Amino acid sequence: MFTLYRVTGDAKYLKAVELIRSQLKTHPRTNEGGFWHKKIYPNQMWLDGLYMGEPFYAEYSQVFNEDNWNDIANQFVWMEKHARDAKTGLLYHGWDESREQKWANKDTGTSPNFWGRAMGWYAMALVDTLDYFPKNHPRRAELVAILQREAEAIAKVQDKKSGVWWQILNMPNAPKNYLESSCSVMFVYALAKGGRQGNLPEKYLP
């Protein structure tokens, strides 16, 4: 919508942009302030939800000079805080603040698995948001650090033989697990773009 508005100047595209922005103003949040994945998924943050919200939120904030940068940074910080596994550095797909979902770990609230596509959405959300996040903002360094931690974890679980990644990242030999194309493309996108931005070391480009 942003691109179409810039190219055409047609007000209908701006109207669509404003509609999406208005949804974020009323979208339910966790007690901490994290956006629910959807209204029908109460109290839950999912990795892929970060891509659905934050790059748009950041672009809107830049274009219309709204100071939402702390709120945007917090979404990534809280998601990582609740979903990251300290041992592997990988992030669980979802987190349920209420611990009520069948899939939620009763102690941590996390879902059971490290899902490739979810980590791919999260990584792409980081690099796309960083396109708009102010270079001089004090919270920017937090987002870059999160991206660097995720890149390190992603690199460790790459399948050495094929060069791509498994659908369940840390279980290559599990029954019915498979080498997954879309998460692999998302990881390559994020690693390459992070390197081009200067937010990731050049070692990730190969």
Image (cartoon, rainbow, N blue to C red):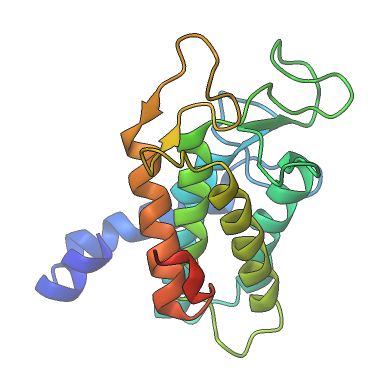
Is 150 positioned to the left or the right of 61 in the image?
Answer: right
Is 112 positioned to the left or the right of 159 in the image?
Answer: right
Name above or below for residue 67 compared with residue 35. below
Q: Position of residue 171 (x, y in %)?
A: 58, 24
- Quarter of the N terminus within the rendering: bottom left
Residue 125 visible to an observer of this rendering: yes
Q: Nearer the viewer, residue 98 or 198?
A: 198
In this figure, what is the number of numbered marks? 0
Is 12 positioned to the left or the right of 114 in the image?
Answer: left
Residue 33 visible to an observer of this rendering: no
Is 83 positioned to the left or the right of 158 in the image?
Answer: right
- Quarter of the C terminus within the rendering: bottom left
In the image, farthest residue toward the bottom: 136
Residue at horizontal 57 percent and vertical 57 percent from the top: 151
Q: Position of residue 119 (x, y in %)?
A: 53, 43
Q: Nearer the viewer, residue 1 or 10?
A: 1
Q: Position of residue 49 (x, y in %)?
A: 52, 42
Residue at horizontal 57 percent and vertical 36 percent from the top: 37
Q: Nearer the viewer, residue 161 or 167?
A: 161
In the image, farthest residue toward the front: 161
Task: Identify the image quadrant of residue 69.
Answer: bottom right
Residue at horizontal 72 percent and vertical 40 percent from the top: 83
Name above or below for residue 47 compared with residue 1. above
Task: Identify the image quadrant of residue 74.
Answer: bottom right
Residue at horizontal 70 percent and vertical 70 percent from the top: 142
Name above or below for residue 91 compared with residue 167. below
In the image, farthest residue toward the left: 8
Q: Position of residue 13 (x, y in %)?
A: 21, 60
In the image, farthest residue toward the right: 107
